[in-house]
Amino acid sequence: MRLGSPAEYKLATPGWRGWLAATRPPTLSAAVTPVLVGSALAYSGGEFAVLVFIATLAAAVLIQIGTNLANDALDFEQGADTPDRLGPVRITASGQASAAEVKMASGVVFGLAALVGVFLVIEGGWPILAIGVVSIAAGLAYTGGPWPLGYHGLGDLFVFVFFGLVAVMGTYYLQAGSVTNLAFLASLPVGLTVAAILVVNNVRDIETDRRAGKLTLAVRLGERISRLQYVLMILAAFVLLPVLLVGGAGPAVGLALLALPLAIVPCRSVLQGAQGAALNIVLKQTTLFHLVFGSLLAVGLLL
């Protein structure tokens, strides 16, 4: 179902800039951060290969881009991207590219991810093959298929699992050939902080998503509880830092506490009821916080 025509949307930047914007560069830190954390943990244990790190990073970013492009086209077809959407303009909704073209681009990017994945499968065996196949399938199922995850309140869980648990532990497994309790524990704050990005996005879009029949968790829980959910997820990421010590991490993981000032401002804005365009600012602040928090955690694991 499509709501509105491309002419009803504000046109995005044309040409290659539009395609670049469609990859949603600000979101790519969600793919980079868990690879940094998992690799740092492996390095601290004397298990690290540069080529594997580069390939893992490339595959993660490509899967993220492929998912973003698929979501761009599929959200438009589902009617979630309407003229009154408050977020950044999408390439399909703006009429700059057809849904078929964007889907094709998504397929090409997923294909590139699969090619990189061949090397990773050779390095890590069938578990990495399973992770790659499930990750790509989940990326497509997020907004596509007969039962899109993002339309049934499972988006938050999807992001927490795949951009937290799976990404960190999968990265560590590729380097070390095993998964430890510490790798699992380190994946938890990463997953929480990246999922918080989605929570902000969904709080901003509650009304338009509800009208489109997109029953995100924010739509199901309501605005008030979703705002509290956001703050609790950020808080939980910091609370989990001492737990890493129990798992065998050194006290340097406390460096992640330096990201606290970056968390205070967006949390205050969310609790004070920021709406519309103000939440776009919170979205950027949360993305920056996730990247800085994860990077500091990675450094702390190295020390």
Image: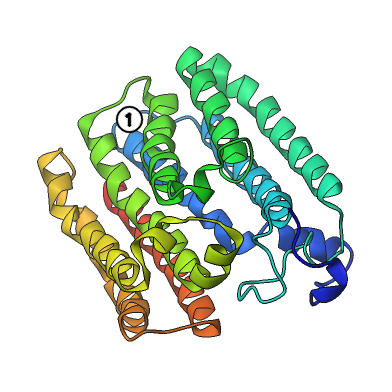
Q: How many marks?
A: 1
Q: Residue at x 76, y 57 (%)?
A: 2
Report which residue position mark 1 lands on: 46
The picture places residue 148, in percent across and down from the top left corner, at 56, 42
The picture places residue 33, in percent across and down from the top left corner, at 45, 51
Q: Is residue 40 left or right of residue 134?
A: left
Q: 286 above or below 115?
A: below
Q: Residue at x 35, y 51 (%)?
A: 190
Q: Is residue 94 left or right of residue 86?
A: right
Dot 1: element: loop
The picture places residue 198, in percent across and down from the top left corner, at 46, 60
Q: Which of 114 and 158 lies nearest the eye of the viewer?
A: 158
Q: Is residue 75 left or right of residue 30?
A: right
Mark 1 is surrounded, within 10 Å at the Cα level, by few (under 14), some (14 to 19) or many (20 or more) other residues, namely: few
Q: Which of 92 and 216 lies nearest the eye of the viewer?
A: 216
Q: Which of 277 and 133 lies nearest the eye of the viewer?
A: 277
Q: Residue at x 86, y 53 (%)?
A: 98
Q: 98 above or below 182?
A: below
State whether residue 269 appears in this view. yes
Q: Residue at x 48, y 55 (%)?
A: 215
